[in-house]
Amino acid sequence: MKALNTVNVDIMVDPARVPGDHNLFICGNDAAAKGEVVGHLAEWFGWKPGNILDLGDISNARGTEMFLALWLRLWGLLGTPHFNIQVVRGT
């Protein structure tokens, strides 16, 4: 199971620090565990379940880890680690 590694710790535990909708990514091989994690993220931290995107099996964890280079550049550009991204879907 992989989750929470694409946002700063303050955003992890309080997603409302970033206004509006934004996304958190999870991946893993156990569907029941993913469901439980989504429930905990919603109940304990306030993440909207609809904003949590399931990337599939654990092999996709590498993709979230590669986000670090972009995340660090955005931190430098924005001057704060208190940001996140939103995936916007087209029709």
Image (cartoon, grey):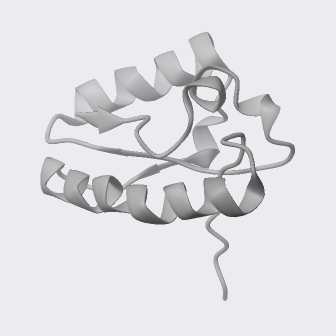
Q: Look at 44% across and 34% down and name the residue there.
A: 4
Q: Work out which residue is located at the far right of the displayed protein and give it.
A: 19
Q: Look at 16% across and 48% down and name the residue there.
A: 58
Image quarter hosting the C terminus: bottom right
- Left or right: 69 as drawn, with respect to 74: left
Q: From this view, report whether residue 32 is shown above or below residue 28.
A: above
Q: Is residue 55 visible?
A: yes
Image quarter hosting the N terminus: top left
Q: Look at 62% across and 45% down and name the residue there.
A: 50
Q: Nearer the viewer, residue 22 or 32?
A: 22
Q: Look at 26% across and 55% down and name the residue there.
A: 56
Residue 16 in the image: state x and y as whole percent: 79, 31
Q: From this view, report whether residue 88 is shown above or below residue 3.
A: below
Q: From this view, report whether residue 73 is shown above or below residue 6.
A: below
Residue 38 in the image: state x and y as whole percent: 46, 29
Residue 88 in the image: state x and y as whole percent: 67, 72
